[in-house]
Image (cartoon, rainbow, N blue to C red):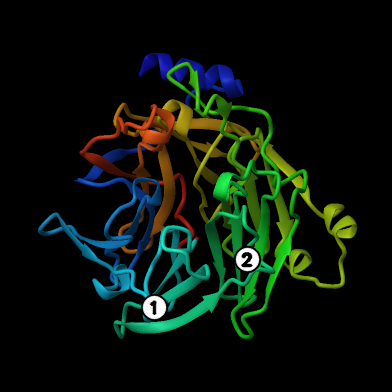
Amino acid sequence: MKKSLLAFSLIIGINAYSQKVNNEVFATVDQSVGNIAFTHQGDLVYSHHPFFNPNFRVVKYDSKTKTTAPFPNKAWNTPRETDDHYLSNVLGIRNDENGIVWMLDMGQRNPVTPKIVGWNTITDTLEHIYYLPETAVVPTSQPNDMVVDTQHGVFVIANEGIGKGGDGSAASLITVDMKTGKTRRLLEGHRTTLPENRPTVVSGKPLAVNGKNLLVGCDGITADKDFEWLYYAPLNGNKVYRVRLVDLLDESLNETALDKRIETYAEKPNNGGLSIDTEGNLYLTAMETNSVAVILAKDKSVHHIFSDENLLWPDGVSYNVADGYMYVSAAQVHLGAVFHNGKSQAKAPFYIFRFKPLAKGVPFR
């Protein structure tokens, strides 16, 4: 792990952050964990990473028995031909202040229209389904993660642009109006959503498919506590960008005008998940070094938070208001079959870590 920490420091020119951050293993489970959300009581609900074709797309974790059960139930995790009220493949998952867990179904594994499914964890009933039509999701789209903005009444989705052999060149943001269901595809192939030619290097080896480096577009996404700023970044790239949500949602702005309102916020390593605290510090998962890092709001400097040899491909990072911890998954994506001549190297146990952020986290995103 010392070697990984050194590599991290060399990549982004930093030293470990001086403030002690307590981290611990929260759970070990038998399948790859994608992203994490929480019920109104603070129980973990998470996606099984679709990269490994899990039987149950989303599960709820019982910390007392240390077992999982399909979420919201088995029927929603069972594909069928009679209707589309089931989850095809899910990675992005978020909860809101109303106790609703929102699941972003990419619709790729069992081809159905991609959708956002909201399940009310207070009443244990379906809250709403928002469908993502072809005008929002093109063939190479891969809706990965999202912000649930209840202030402006909109979902903002990060589209990686690597679906069905896509190379990230059509990466974008997608907005969904909560009242009308109207969708918009924004900043497609834009300088801030495109991947840079910065391959993901794990254990000294670039991540590649059929000899071609995997480059992933817009991936990490979050918003500050007041829903003023949206922060987003390609997985492969050394910059985090931000834009005011009122500007992003202003339909009178064409892309040229919107481009002028986007800020290059800070430098970063290649990263997956993104979260934020009430002081504006950004937390990101640095897959190449089994690490979590933070971008400090006060000066935009990047610092190492913690690493662990079992934090293999840290993916989602989310704040649980019930206990004050940030949770982060270890998905082992880089050990998947597509990167190892058709034979997966990933193996159980898979880890869920948690740590205390530098300031109180911002729930729901």
Residue sitting nearer the eye, 133 or 352: 133
Instruction: Give how far across and how far down residue 95 sits, in percent.
Output: 42, 68
Which residue matches tag 2? 227
* Of marks 1 and 2, the one in the foreground: 1
Please state which amino acid type lies under the numbered disc 1: His
Which residue is most to the front?
81
**Mark 1 Cα within 10 Å, few/some/many (few <14, many 20+)?**
some
The number of numbered discs placed on residues in the rendered structure image is: 2
Q: Quadrant of the N terminus?
A: top left
Packing grade of label 2 (10 A; few <14, some 14-19, many >=20) is: some
Q: Residue at x 30, y 30 (%)?
A: 345
Q: Name the amino acid, label 2.
A: Phe
Q: Which residue is mark 1?
A: 85
Q: Residue at x 43, y 30 (%)?
A: 339
Answer left or right for 50 relative to 345.
right
- Horizontal and vertical percent for residue 28? 20, 44
- Residue 8 image offset from top left, x and y in percent: 51, 22
Q: Secondary structure at mark 2?
A: loop
Does dot 1 land on a helix, a strand or a loop?
loop
37 left or right, relative to 273 = left
Of 51 and 67, which appears nearest the observer? 51
The residue depicted at 81 percent of the width and 72 percent of the height is 251
In the figure, residue 175 lies in which quadrant? Answer: bottom right
